[in-house]
Image (spheres, rainbow, N blue to C red):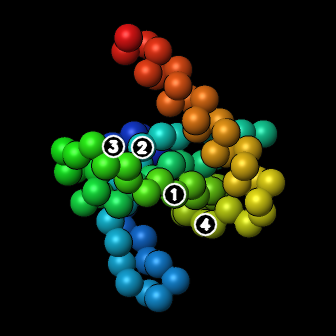
């Protein structure tokens, strides 16, 4: 798998088959599995104080994204991303 970098933009299809561009906001490995946090590229590029929607996706061995299957797995990834963002904010202060 090629390494996915923060800032990369990918096109994904939603459940209706509509394509959306998403930008990688964070990359993490938890318990041997790779995950990315993404937001819609259009939302990320807009300078605004509004919160943006963030989605977590699992990265398979081929570098393809898939949905996180369980609430437990989602909670682990969400907590790890929150911790990573808190550490980034502390570094900026």
x 55%, y 63%: residue: 65
Marked residue nearer the N-terminal end (1 or 2): 2
Q: Secondary structure at mark 2?
A: strand
Q: Which mark is residue 2?
A: none
Q: Seen in the image, is 93 located left or right of residue 32?
A: left
Q: Which mark is residue 55?
A: 1
- Could you tell me how far apart the alpha carbons at marks 3 and 2 are, in whole angstroms? 6 Å
Q: Pinpoint residue 12: horizontal percent, then vertical percent.
A: 42, 71
Q: Pinpoint residue 62: horizontal percent, then vertical percent.
A: 58, 59
Marked residue nearer the N-terminal end (4 or 3): 3
Frontmost of labels 1 and 4 is: 1
- Could you tell me how far apart the alpha carbons at marks 1 and 4 are, in whole angstroms? 11 Å
Q: Nearer the viewer, residue 21 or 4?
A: 21
Give the answer, above or below, for where 29 lies relative to 53: above
Q: Secondary structure at mark 1?
A: strand
Q: Which residue is mark 4?
A: 66
Residue 48 seen anywhere in this rendered image of the structure: yes
Residue 59 seen anywhere in this rendered image of the structure: no
Q: Which residue is mark 2?
A: 25
Q: Residues within 10 Å of mark 3 (few under 14, many from 20)?
A: some
Residue reaching furthest front? 50
Q: Nearer the viewer, residue 16 or 6?
A: 16
Marked residue nearer the N-terminal end (4 or 2): 2
Give the answer, above or below, for where 47 lies relative to 64: above
Q: Which mark is residue 7?
A: 3
């Amino acid at each position: 798998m090629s390494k996915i970098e923060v800032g990369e933009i990918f096109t994904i299809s939603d459940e209706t088959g509509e394509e959306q561009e998403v930008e990688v906001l964070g990359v993490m490995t938890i318990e041997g599995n790779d995950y990315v946090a993404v937001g819609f590229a259009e939302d990320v590029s807009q300078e605004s104080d509004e919160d943006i929607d963030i989605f977590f996706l699992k990265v398979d061995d081929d570098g393809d994204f898939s949905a996180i299957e369980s609430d437990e797995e989602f909670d682990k990834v969400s907590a790890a991303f929150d911790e990573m963002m808190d550490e980034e904010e502390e570094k900026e202060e």
